[in-house]
Amino acid sequence: MKERVLVVDDTKDMVSFLKRLISSELGVEVVGVFRASDAVETVSGGSVDVVIADVKMPEKDGVTLLRELKTIDEDIVVILLTGYGTVDMAVESLKLGAYDFLTKPIDNDRLLHTVKKALQFRMVLKEKTRLEETIKHSGLSRELIGESRVMEELMENIKTVAGTDETVLITGETGTGKELAARTIHRMSKRARGPFIAVNCPAIPESILESELFGYKKGAFTSAVSDKKGLFEVSNGGTIFLDEVADIPVSVQTKLLRVLQEKEFKPLGDTSSVKVDVRVLASTNQDIEGKVEKGLFRDDLYYRLNVITIRMPSLSERIDDIPLLSRHFLRRYAIEFGKEIRDFTEDAMAYLTAREWRGNVRELQNVIKRAVIFSRGPEIDSSCFQGPSRISPCKDIVLNDILSLDYRMARNKVLERFTVSFVRNLLQKTDGNVTRAARMAGMERQSLQHLMRKYGINPQDYRKEPAR
Protein backbone atom coordinates (compact mmCIF):
# COMPACT_ATOMS: atom_id res chain seq x y z
CA MET A 1 0.00 0.00 0.00
CA LYS A 2 1.27 3.46 -0.96
CA GLU A 3 2.49 5.64 1.90
CA ARG A 4 0.15 8.48 2.79
CA VAL A 5 0.94 11.94 4.17
CA LEU A 6 -1.67 14.30 5.63
CA VAL A 7 -1.05 18.06 5.53
CA VAL A 8 -3.06 20.23 7.99
CA ASP A 9 -2.97 24.05 7.61
CA ASP A 10 -5.65 26.73 7.59
CA THR A 11 -3.87 28.45 4.69
CA LYS A 12 -4.96 26.91 1.38
CA ASP A 13 -1.86 28.09 -0.50
CA MET A 14 0.41 26.36 2.04
CA VAL A 15 -1.55 23.11 1.77
CA SER A 16 -1.36 23.20 -2.04
CA PHE A 17 2.36 23.95 -1.97
CA LEU A 18 3.21 21.13 0.44
CA LYS A 19 1.08 18.63 -1.48
CA ARG A 20 2.88 19.42 -4.75
CA LEU A 21 6.34 19.44 -3.20
CA ILE A 22 6.06 16.20 -1.24
CA SER A 23 4.15 14.16 -3.83
CA SER A 24 6.46 15.15 -6.70
CA GLU A 25 9.74 14.70 -4.79
CA LEU A 26 8.93 11.64 -2.66
CA GLY A 27 6.32 9.91 -4.82
CA VAL A 28 3.83 9.41 -1.98
CA GLU A 29 0.13 10.16 -1.71
CA VAL A 30 -0.53 13.52 -0.01
CA VAL A 31 -3.91 14.61 1.34
CA GLY A 32 -4.66 18.14 2.54
CA VAL A 33 -7.23 19.47 5.03
CA PHE A 34 -7.75 22.96 6.46
CA ARG A 35 -9.14 22.22 9.94
CA ALA A 36 -7.92 20.16 12.88
CA SER A 37 -11.30 18.39 13.16
CA ASP A 38 -10.94 17.18 9.55
CA ALA A 39 -7.48 15.87 10.39
CA VAL A 40 -8.87 13.89 13.33
CA GLU A 41 -11.56 12.41 11.07
CA THR A 42 -9.04 11.47 8.38
CA VAL A 43 -6.64 9.76 10.81
CA SER A 44 -9.57 7.95 12.45
CA GLY A 45 -10.35 6.47 9.05
CA GLY A 46 -6.87 4.92 8.98
CA SER A 47 -4.14 4.68 6.31
CA VAL A 48 -2.28 7.87 7.34
CA ASP A 49 1.43 7.44 7.98
CA VAL A 50 2.72 10.97 8.57
CA VAL A 51 0.91 14.16 9.57
CA ILE A 52 2.38 17.63 8.87
CA ALA A 53 0.44 20.19 10.90
CA ASP A 54 0.69 23.94 11.46
CA VAL A 55 0.82 24.92 15.12
CA LYS A 56 -1.22 28.13 14.82
CA MET A 57 -4.78 27.33 13.61
CA PRO A 58 -8.07 29.00 14.57
CA GLU A 59 -10.06 25.94 15.64
CA LYS A 60 -7.39 24.29 17.78
CA ASP A 61 -3.64 24.54 17.73
CA GLY A 62 -1.25 21.90 16.42
CA VAL A 63 -0.10 20.82 19.88
CA THR A 64 -3.69 20.04 20.90
CA LEU A 65 -4.16 18.19 17.61
CA LEU A 66 -1.01 16.18 18.33
CA ARG A 67 -2.46 15.00 21.64
CA GLU A 68 -5.70 13.87 19.98
CA LEU A 69 -3.98 12.09 17.10
CA LYS A 70 -1.78 10.13 19.52
CA THR A 71 -4.88 8.86 21.32
CA ILE A 72 -6.21 7.57 17.99
CA ASP A 73 -2.94 6.01 16.78
CA GLU A 74 -0.02 6.08 19.20
CA ASP A 75 2.39 5.27 16.36
CA ILE A 76 1.24 8.11 14.09
CA VAL A 77 4.23 10.27 13.07
CA VAL A 78 3.55 14.00 13.46
CA ILE A 79 5.72 16.88 12.22
CA LEU A 80 4.77 20.36 13.49
CA LEU A 81 5.35 23.62 11.56
CA THR A 82 5.22 27.11 13.03
CA GLY A 83 6.28 30.66 12.32
CA TYR A 84 6.12 31.51 16.03
CA GLY A 85 8.26 28.76 17.48
CA THR A 86 9.87 28.93 20.87
CA VAL A 87 12.23 26.51 22.58
CA ASP A 88 9.59 25.72 25.24
CA MET A 89 6.99 24.94 22.60
CA ALA A 90 9.40 22.64 20.74
CA VAL A 91 10.33 20.78 23.94
CA GLU A 92 6.67 20.32 24.88
CA SER A 93 5.83 19.01 21.41
CA LEU A 94 8.64 16.48 21.45
CA LYS A 95 7.61 15.30 24.92
CA LEU A 96 4.09 14.72 23.60
CA GLY A 97 5.47 12.52 20.84
CA ALA A 98 6.05 14.85 17.89
CA TYR A 99 8.61 13.46 15.44
CA ASP A 100 10.08 16.89 14.66
CA PHE A 101 9.39 20.62 15.04
CA LEU A 102 10.20 22.86 12.02
CA THR A 103 9.97 26.62 11.77
CA LYS A 104 8.70 28.78 8.89
CA PRO A 105 9.76 29.93 6.38
CA ILE A 106 10.23 26.31 5.34
CA ASP A 107 13.53 25.04 4.05
CA ASN A 108 12.35 22.70 1.29
CA ASP A 109 15.33 20.36 1.43
CA ARG A 110 15.14 20.02 5.19
CA LEU A 111 11.38 19.41 5.05
CA LEU A 112 11.73 16.69 2.40
CA HIS A 113 14.56 15.04 4.33
CA THR A 114 12.47 15.10 7.53
CA VAL A 115 9.37 13.67 5.83
CA LYS A 116 11.43 10.92 4.17
CA LYS A 117 12.95 9.91 7.52
CA ALA A 118 9.53 10.12 9.16
CA LEU A 119 8.07 7.70 6.58
CA GLN A 120 10.93 5.28 7.19
CA PHE A 121 10.37 5.53 10.93
CA ARG A 122 6.67 4.84 10.41
CA MET A 123 7.54 1.68 8.44
CA VAL A 124 9.79 0.50 11.27
CA LEU A 125 6.94 1.00 13.75
CA LYS A 126 4.55 -0.92 11.49
CA GLU A 127 6.99 -3.81 11.19
CA LYS A 128 7.49 -3.84 14.96
CA THR A 129 3.73 -4.02 15.50
CA ARG A 130 3.41 -6.78 12.91
CA LEU A 131 6.15 -8.84 14.55
CA GLU A 132 4.64 -8.35 17.99
CA GLU A 133 1.27 -9.56 16.71
CA THR A 134 2.92 -12.53 15.02
CA ILE A 135 4.74 -13.49 18.20
CA LYS A 136 1.58 -13.00 20.24
CA HIS A 137 -0.45 -15.18 17.87
CA SER A 138 2.27 -17.80 17.77
CA GLY A 139 2.41 -17.87 21.56
CA LEU A 140 -1.34 -18.35 21.80
CA SER A 141 -1.76 -20.98 19.11
CA ARG A 142 1.51 -22.92 19.38
CA GLU A 143 2.69 -23.46 22.90
CA LEU A 144 4.17 -26.72 21.57
CA ILE A 145 7.38 -26.36 19.57
CA GLY A 146 8.09 -28.64 16.64
CA GLU A 147 8.04 -28.89 12.87
CA SER A 148 8.33 -32.66 12.44
CA ARG A 149 5.58 -34.63 10.72
CA VAL A 150 4.38 -36.13 14.01
CA MET A 151 4.10 -32.66 15.58
CA GLU A 152 2.22 -31.30 12.58
CA GLU A 153 -0.27 -34.14 12.96
CA LEU A 154 -0.52 -33.45 16.70
CA MET A 155 -1.24 -29.75 16.12
CA GLU A 156 -3.91 -30.61 13.58
CA ASN A 157 -5.57 -32.90 16.13
CA ILE A 158 -5.34 -30.21 18.80
CA LYS A 159 -6.91 -27.61 16.50
CA THR A 160 -9.73 -30.04 15.73
CA VAL A 161 -10.59 -30.89 19.33
CA ALA A 162 -10.11 -27.28 20.49
CA GLY A 163 -13.14 -26.31 18.43
CA THR A 164 -15.33 -28.71 20.41
CA ASP A 165 -16.26 -28.70 24.08
CA GLU A 166 -15.59 -32.41 24.63
CA THR A 167 -13.54 -33.95 27.41
CA VAL A 168 -10.02 -34.85 26.26
CA LEU A 169 -7.62 -37.38 27.77
CA ILE A 170 -4.00 -36.54 26.97
CA THR A 171 -1.64 -39.50 27.26
CA GLY A 172 2.11 -39.80 26.97
CA GLU A 173 5.35 -40.32 28.81
CA THR A 174 6.65 -37.97 31.47
CA GLY A 175 8.15 -34.82 30.00
CA THR A 176 6.35 -34.91 26.64
CA GLY A 177 4.38 -31.69 27.24
CA LYS A 178 0.92 -32.88 28.26
CA GLU A 179 0.15 -29.70 30.19
CA LEU A 180 1.36 -27.54 27.30
CA ALA A 181 -1.02 -29.44 25.02
CA ALA A 182 -3.87 -28.78 27.45
CA ARG A 183 -3.07 -25.07 27.60
CA THR A 184 -2.92 -24.92 23.80
CA ILE A 185 -6.34 -26.59 23.53
CA HIS A 186 -7.74 -24.04 25.99
CA ARG A 187 -6.22 -21.02 24.26
CA MET A 188 -7.46 -22.13 20.85
CA SER A 189 -10.97 -22.84 22.16
CA LYS A 190 -14.02 -20.63 22.61
CA ARG A 191 -13.22 -20.68 26.35
CA ALA A 192 -9.90 -18.88 25.86
CA ARG A 193 -11.11 -15.79 27.76
CA GLY A 194 -12.11 -17.94 30.72
CA PRO A 195 -9.80 -19.32 33.42
CA PHE A 196 -7.43 -22.24 32.93
CA ILE A 197 -6.87 -24.11 36.18
CA ALA A 198 -4.23 -26.86 36.29
CA VAL A 199 -4.49 -29.38 39.12
CA ASN A 200 -1.51 -31.63 39.85
CA CYS A 201 -3.59 -34.45 41.33
CA PRO A 202 -0.75 -36.52 42.88
CA ALA A 203 0.68 -33.43 44.59
CA ILE A 204 -2.49 -32.88 46.66
CA PRO A 205 -2.82 -35.19 49.66
CA GLU A 206 -5.73 -37.62 49.34
CA SER A 207 -7.28 -36.30 52.54
CA ILE A 208 -7.82 -32.79 51.11
CA LEU A 209 -8.15 -33.45 47.36
CA GLU A 210 -11.95 -33.57 47.50
CA SER A 211 -12.25 -30.25 49.33
CA GLU A 212 -9.74 -28.65 46.93
CA LEU A 213 -11.68 -29.75 43.88
CA PHE A 214 -15.22 -29.19 45.13
CA GLY A 215 -14.91 -26.73 48.02
CA TYR A 216 -16.69 -26.81 51.37
CA LYS A 217 -19.13 -24.94 53.57
CA LYS A 218 -18.29 -23.33 56.85
CA GLY A 219 -18.37 -25.96 59.61
CA ALA A 220 -18.00 -28.93 57.25
CA PHE A 221 -15.03 -29.99 59.38
CA THR A 222 -13.09 -28.60 62.32
CA SER A 223 -10.81 -26.18 60.42
CA ALA A 224 -13.53 -25.00 57.99
CA VAL A 225 -14.03 -21.54 59.49
CA SER A 226 -15.51 -20.08 56.28
CA ASP A 227 -16.90 -21.16 52.91
CA LYS A 228 -14.36 -22.02 50.26
CA LYS A 229 -14.90 -22.38 46.52
CA GLY A 230 -13.46 -25.50 44.95
CA LEU A 231 -11.30 -25.46 41.83
CA PHE A 232 -14.20 -26.64 39.68
CA GLU A 233 -16.22 -23.59 40.70
CA VAL A 234 -13.20 -21.32 40.20
CA SER A 235 -12.87 -22.76 36.67
CA ASN A 236 -16.47 -21.90 35.77
CA GLY A 237 -16.64 -20.64 32.19
CA GLY A 238 -13.17 -21.98 31.44
CA THR A 239 -11.14 -25.17 31.54
CA ILE A 240 -9.87 -27.38 34.35
CA PHE A 241 -6.88 -29.62 33.67
CA LEU A 242 -6.52 -32.71 35.85
CA ASP A 243 -2.85 -33.65 35.55
CA GLU A 244 -2.13 -37.35 36.23
CA VAL A 245 -5.81 -38.10 36.75
CA ALA A 246 -5.06 -41.80 37.24
CA ASP A 247 -3.81 -40.96 40.74
CA ILE A 248 -7.18 -39.62 41.91
CA PRO A 249 -8.35 -41.89 44.77
CA VAL A 250 -11.50 -43.97 44.30
CA SER A 251 -13.24 -41.98 47.04
CA VAL A 252 -13.08 -38.83 44.87
CA GLN A 253 -13.75 -40.53 41.52
CA THR A 254 -17.51 -40.82 42.16
CA LYS A 255 -17.89 -37.09 42.68
CA LEU A 256 -15.77 -36.36 39.61
CA LEU A 257 -18.01 -38.63 37.53
CA ARG A 258 -21.06 -36.65 38.62
CA VAL A 259 -19.46 -33.39 37.52
CA LEU A 260 -18.74 -34.85 34.09
CA GLN A 261 -22.26 -36.28 33.75
CA GLU A 262 -24.45 -33.65 35.38
CA LYS A 263 -22.22 -30.54 35.39
CA GLU A 264 -22.92 -30.13 39.09
CA PHE A 265 -21.53 -31.15 42.48
CA LYS A 266 -22.09 -30.64 46.20
CA PRO A 267 -19.37 -28.91 48.25
CA LEU A 268 -18.48 -30.69 51.47
CA GLY A 269 -21.08 -29.95 54.12
CA ASP A 270 -23.60 -28.49 51.66
CA THR A 271 -27.04 -29.91 50.90
CA SER A 272 -27.52 -28.10 47.59
CA SER A 273 -25.65 -28.60 44.33
CA VAL A 274 -23.51 -26.07 42.49
CA LYS A 275 -23.93 -25.89 38.71
CA VAL A 276 -20.78 -25.28 36.66
CA ASP A 277 -19.91 -24.80 33.01
CA VAL A 278 -16.41 -26.26 32.84
CA ARG A 279 -14.51 -28.15 30.18
CA VAL A 280 -12.43 -30.99 31.60
CA LEU A 281 -9.04 -31.93 30.18
CA ALA A 282 -7.06 -34.70 31.83
CA SER A 283 -3.68 -36.36 31.42
CA THR A 284 -1.94 -39.55 32.42
CA ASN A 285 1.30 -41.39 31.86
CA GLN A 286 -0.12 -44.58 33.31
CA ASP A 287 -2.08 -47.56 31.95
CA ILE A 288 -5.56 -46.55 33.13
CA GLU A 289 -7.18 -49.57 31.50
CA GLY A 290 -4.91 -51.76 33.62
CA LYS A 291 -5.99 -49.86 36.73
CA VAL A 292 -9.63 -50.33 35.70
CA GLU A 293 -9.11 -54.09 35.46
CA LYS A 294 -7.57 -54.10 38.95
CA GLY A 295 -10.47 -52.09 40.38
CA LEU A 296 -8.28 -49.06 41.12
CA PHE A 297 -10.10 -46.77 38.67
CA ARG A 298 -13.81 -46.63 37.88
CA ASP A 299 -14.57 -47.87 34.39
CA ASP A 300 -17.50 -45.45 33.95
CA LEU A 301 -15.25 -42.52 34.88
CA TYR A 302 -12.58 -43.73 32.45
CA TYR A 303 -15.09 -43.83 29.60
CA ARG A 304 -16.28 -40.33 30.47
CA LEU A 305 -12.73 -38.99 30.49
CA ASN A 306 -11.71 -40.87 27.37
CA VAL A 307 -14.17 -39.22 24.97
CA ILE A 308 -11.25 -37.99 22.85
CA THR A 309 -7.66 -39.17 23.29
CA ILE A 310 -4.55 -37.26 22.23
CA ARG A 311 -1.24 -39.05 22.59
CA MET A 312 1.86 -36.94 23.07
CA PRO A 313 4.82 -38.33 21.09
CA SER A 314 8.06 -39.08 22.88
CA LEU A 315 11.18 -37.19 21.86
CA SER A 316 12.50 -40.35 20.19
CA GLU A 317 9.57 -40.09 17.76
CA ARG A 318 10.44 -36.51 16.83
CA ILE A 319 14.23 -36.44 16.64
CA ASP A 320 14.02 -33.88 13.83
CA ASP A 321 12.69 -31.37 16.39
CA ILE A 322 15.70 -31.65 18.73
CA PRO A 323 17.74 -28.86 17.03
CA LEU A 324 14.71 -26.54 17.05
CA LEU A 325 13.89 -27.31 20.69
CA SER A 326 17.53 -27.03 21.75
CA ARG A 327 17.95 -23.59 20.19
CA HIS A 328 14.63 -22.45 21.69
CA PHE A 329 15.82 -23.39 25.18
CA LEU A 330 19.27 -21.92 24.47
CA ARG A 331 17.76 -18.50 23.62
CA ARG A 332 15.44 -18.64 26.59
CA TYR A 333 18.12 -19.43 29.17
CA ALA A 334 20.79 -17.22 27.58
CA ILE A 335 18.45 -14.27 28.14
CA GLU A 336 17.49 -15.46 31.63
CA PHE A 337 21.09 -15.87 32.79
CA GLY A 338 22.53 -12.95 30.81
CA LYS A 339 24.83 -15.07 28.67
CA GLU A 340 26.14 -14.13 25.20
CA ILE A 341 25.75 -17.58 23.63
CA ARG A 342 25.02 -17.77 19.90
CA ASP A 343 24.58 -21.47 19.13
CA PHE A 344 25.78 -25.04 19.58
CA THR A 345 28.90 -26.45 17.96
CA GLU A 346 28.43 -29.27 15.46
CA ASP A 347 29.65 -31.91 17.92
CA ALA A 348 27.29 -30.60 20.60
CA MET A 349 24.29 -30.80 18.29
CA ALA A 350 25.38 -34.26 17.15
CA TYR A 351 25.47 -35.33 20.79
CA LEU A 352 21.99 -33.94 21.47
CA THR A 353 20.41 -35.62 18.45
CA ALA A 354 22.10 -38.99 19.07
CA ARG A 355 21.39 -39.24 22.76
CA GLU A 356 18.53 -41.20 24.29
CA TRP A 357 16.08 -38.89 26.08
CA ARG A 358 14.13 -40.98 28.56
CA GLY A 359 12.86 -37.81 30.22
CA ASN A 360 11.79 -36.44 26.83
CA VAL A 361 11.52 -32.67 26.25
CA ARG A 362 11.75 -31.84 29.95
CA GLU A 363 15.05 -33.69 30.25
CA LEU A 364 16.38 -31.94 27.14
CA GLN A 365 15.29 -28.61 28.59
CA ASN A 366 17.11 -29.24 31.87
CA VAL A 367 20.29 -30.37 30.08
CA ILE A 368 20.33 -27.20 27.96
CA LYS A 369 19.67 -25.08 31.04
CA ARG A 370 22.66 -26.58 32.85
CA ALA A 371 24.84 -26.19 29.76
CA VAL A 372 23.96 -22.49 29.49
CA ILE A 373 24.70 -21.92 33.16
CA PHE A 374 28.16 -23.53 32.97
CA SER A 375 29.12 -22.40 29.45
CA ARG A 376 32.02 -19.94 29.27
CA GLY A 377 32.15 -19.18 25.54
CA PRO A 378 29.97 -17.91 22.70
CA GLU A 379 29.00 -21.48 21.71
CA ILE A 380 28.01 -24.59 23.63
CA ASP A 381 30.24 -27.56 22.80
CA SER A 382 29.94 -31.21 23.77
CA SER A 383 32.15 -30.74 26.84
CA CYS A 384 29.24 -28.88 28.47
CA PHE A 385 27.30 -32.16 28.48
CA GLN A 386 29.98 -34.30 30.11
CA GLY A 387 28.84 -36.30 33.07
CA PRO A 388 25.50 -38.03 33.57
CA SER A 389 22.54 -35.70 33.24
CA ARG A 390 20.24 -38.37 34.62
CA ILE A 391 21.13 -40.30 37.75
CA SER A 392 21.46 -44.01 37.15
CA PRO A 393 20.88 -46.12 40.28
CA CYS A 394 23.67 -48.55 39.51
CA LYS A 395 26.33 -46.44 37.77
CA ASP A 396 29.71 -45.82 39.40
CA ILE A 397 28.74 -47.51 42.66
CA VAL A 398 32.22 -49.00 43.13
CA LEU A 399 34.74 -46.16 42.79
CA ASN A 400 38.44 -45.87 43.46
CA ASP A 401 37.91 -43.78 46.59
CA ILE A 402 36.22 -46.65 48.45
CA LEU A 403 38.50 -49.50 47.41
CA SER A 404 41.04 -48.53 50.07
CA LEU A 405 38.48 -48.74 52.88
CA ASP A 406 37.88 -51.81 55.03
CA TYR A 407 35.04 -54.12 53.97
CA ARG A 408 32.39 -52.82 56.39
CA MET A 409 33.02 -49.16 55.62
CA ALA A 410 33.17 -49.83 51.86
CA ARG A 411 29.90 -51.80 52.01
CA ASN A 412 28.15 -48.98 53.89
CA LYS A 413 29.47 -46.40 51.46
CA VAL A 414 28.28 -48.43 48.45
CA LEU A 415 24.86 -48.96 50.08
CA GLU A 416 24.55 -45.25 50.81
CA ARG A 417 25.42 -44.29 47.23
CA PHE A 418 23.05 -46.88 45.83
CA THR A 419 20.21 -45.70 48.08
CA VAL A 420 20.68 -42.03 47.22
CA SER A 421 20.85 -42.75 43.49
CA PHE A 422 17.87 -45.13 43.65
CA VAL A 423 15.64 -42.64 45.51
CA ARG A 424 16.62 -39.76 43.25
CA ASN A 425 15.90 -41.87 40.18
CA LEU A 426 12.44 -42.73 41.57
CA LEU A 427 11.63 -39.08 42.26
CA GLN A 428 12.80 -38.07 38.81
CA LYS A 429 10.49 -40.64 37.19
CA THR A 430 7.51 -39.49 39.27
CA ASP A 431 8.16 -35.73 39.10
CA GLY A 432 8.80 -35.63 42.84
CA ASN A 433 5.58 -37.47 43.79
CA VAL A 434 6.51 -39.37 46.95
CA THR A 435 3.38 -41.57 47.00
CA ARG A 436 3.95 -42.83 43.48
CA ALA A 437 7.68 -43.25 44.08
CA ALA A 438 7.00 -45.41 47.14
CA ARG A 439 4.48 -47.46 45.17
CA MET A 440 7.01 -48.03 42.36
CA ALA A 441 9.65 -49.08 44.89
CA GLY A 442 7.26 -51.46 46.68
CA MET A 443 7.78 -49.77 50.02
CA GLU A 444 5.77 -47.78 52.55
CA ARG A 445 5.57 -44.03 52.02
CA GLN A 446 6.89 -43.39 55.53
CA SER A 447 9.95 -45.56 54.84
CA LEU A 448 10.75 -43.61 51.69
CA GLN A 449 10.30 -40.31 53.56
CA HIS A 450 12.71 -41.58 56.24
CA LEU A 451 15.38 -42.24 53.57
CA MET A 452 14.80 -38.82 52.04
CA ARG A 453 15.26 -37.10 55.39
CA LYS A 454 18.31 -39.19 56.19
CA TYR A 455 20.10 -38.30 52.96
CA GLY A 456 18.77 -34.74 52.58
CA ILE A 457 16.75 -35.39 49.41
CA ASN A 458 14.03 -32.82 48.69
CA PRO A 459 11.19 -34.02 46.40
CA GLN A 460 10.49 -30.39 45.41
CA ASP A 461 13.73 -30.45 43.38
CA TYR A 462 12.21 -33.04 41.05
CA ARG A 463 8.84 -31.43 40.40
CA LYS A 464 8.13 -29.90 37.04
CA GLU A 465 8.48 -26.13 36.62
CA PRO A 466 5.26 -24.13 37.10
CA ALA A 467 3.48 -23.04 33.94
CA ARG A 468 4.31 -19.56 32.59
Image (tube, rainbow, N blue to C red):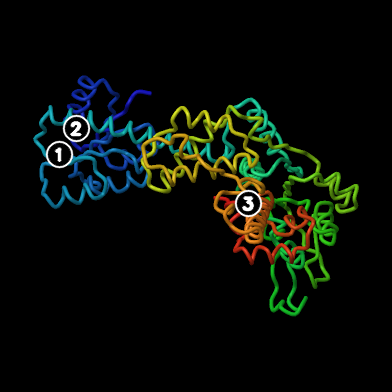
Q: Amino acid at mark 3?
A: Gly
User: Relative to 115, is 396 on the left or the right?
Assistant: right
**Which mark identifies residue 194?**
3
Q: Name the one closer to the observer, 141 or 347.
A: 347
> Which residue lies under the disc numbered 2?
114
Question: Compared to 107, does 252 lie above or below?
Answer: below
Q: Residue at x 14, y 52 (%)?
A: 88
Q: Are marks 3 and 1 in contact (CB under 8 Å)?
A: no
Few, some or many residues within 10 Å of mark 3 (<14, 14–19, 20+):
some
> Which residue lies under the disc numbered 1?
102
Q: Amino acid at mark 1?
A: Leu
Mark 3 falls on what kind of element?
loop
Q: Mark 2, mark 3: which one is toward the viewer?
A: 3
Name the spot of residue 198 as percent of width and height, x first.
66, 53
Mark 1 falls on what kind of element?
strand
Marks 2 and 3, the one that precedes in the sequence: 2
Residue 13: image quadrant is top left
Q: Name the one closer to the observer, 48 or 383.
A: 383
Marks 1 and 2, the one that precedes in the sequence: 1
